[in-house]
Amino acid sequence: MAGSVRRPEQTGPPELFYNEDQARKYTQNSRIIEIQSQMSERAVELLCLREDQPCYLLDVGCGSGLSGDYITEQGHHWVGIDISTAMLDVALDREIEGDLILGDMGQGIPFRPGTFDGCISISALQWLCNANKKTHNPPRRLFRFFTTLYSALARGSRAVLQLYPENAEQLELVTAQAMRAGFTGGMVVDFPNSTKAKKFFLCLFAGVSGVLPKGLGEESAEQGVTHQASFVKERMRFKNAKGKSVKKSKDWILEKKERRRRQGKEVRADTKYSGRKRRPNF
């Protein structure tokens, strides 16, 4: 029955849930990859980073590095922290371009004050709302995470944390601990009237008070446009406005190959077939 399905964070510690089998899905399941990529793109958009200037970002719960791939595509540098060795092993096998750290976000962010220009996190924060060990105290672990994150961020920067809250009480708990740690900001909800497309992003400001961005899908609901169509259209508009190459296009592939060459990595030579779409085998 649908009502009896347990959420991943209710099954035990994340380092056990994200084992080798789960980690493998993040390289083989096209739907997981697409969803992670979309949420990463939205999180980076909400950071409102400076145009045409590389930034140094933190990815909390980086997993196999799917979020980091998008950060790299945008020309930024990043460090990822995750509690699962299996997920980090997958990231290493994929030869991602960020640095990786094995660590528990509930024990704090181990970086010097003002290190990062921003932080994103995809589908990780809700794990701190559960006590997987007798020594775990969710409010205390959340507060430890937010206080050390606040310290690690440069003043005036943002943190955008996507999460799947179980209920309103969890949202209140997370937001309260973030504000107690010194952050301002709040929750941005994309497509609030859609069951499948609805996404929660905790948008936090470090050291300054900013204007909370609007969630996607608010206008489209009034105009009778479907949430999913509006989401795709909005994403393309934003990318074109910044002059970025469309993902998986020929220009995008050539840019990525050139970037890897500059890093001294072995890359196949460019040919007239580079980036060309193949015809279906039927």
Image (tube, rainbow, N blue to C red):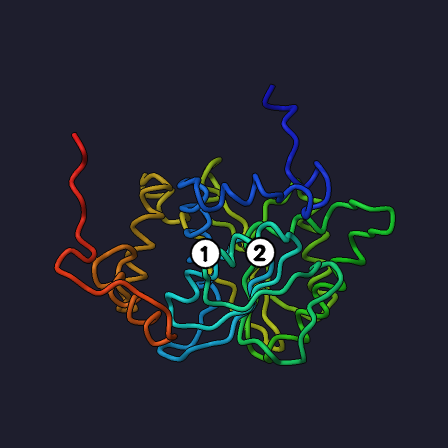
Q: Residue at x 54, y 71 (%)?
A: 118
Q: Position of residue 136 (x, y in %)?
A: 82, 51
Judging depth in this view, the residue of 163 and 26 nearest the camera is 26
Q: Residue furthest right?
A: 134
| Position of the N terminus by quadrant | top right
State the mark number for residue 94: 1
SS class, disc 2? helix
Q: Position of residue 83 (x, y in %)?
A: 66, 55
Residue denoted by label 2? 88
Q: Position of residue 249 (x, y in %)?
A: 23, 56
Three-letter residue code for mark 1: Arg
Q: Residue furthest left?
A: 272
Report the number of discs: 2
Three-letter residue code for mark 2: Leu
Q: Residue at x 40, y 47 (%)?
A: 217
Q: Residue at x 35, y 45 (%)?
A: 220
Q: Residue furthest top?
A: 1
Judging depth in this view, the residue of 146 and 259 nearest the camera is 259
Judging depth in this view, the residue of 105 and 253 nearest the camera is 253
Left or right: residue 99 versus residue 70 is: right
Q: Position of residue 168 (x, y in %)?
A: 67, 43
Res 169 quadrant in image: top right
Q: In this picture, is 64 found above or below 23? A: below
| Position of the C terminus by quadrant | top left
Measured Cα–Cα span from mark 1 to mark 2: 10 Å
Q: In this picture, is 71 found above or below 20? A: below
Q: Residue at x 18, y 48 (%)?
A: 277
- Sequence order check, earlier mark of 1 and 2: 2
SS class, disc 1? loop
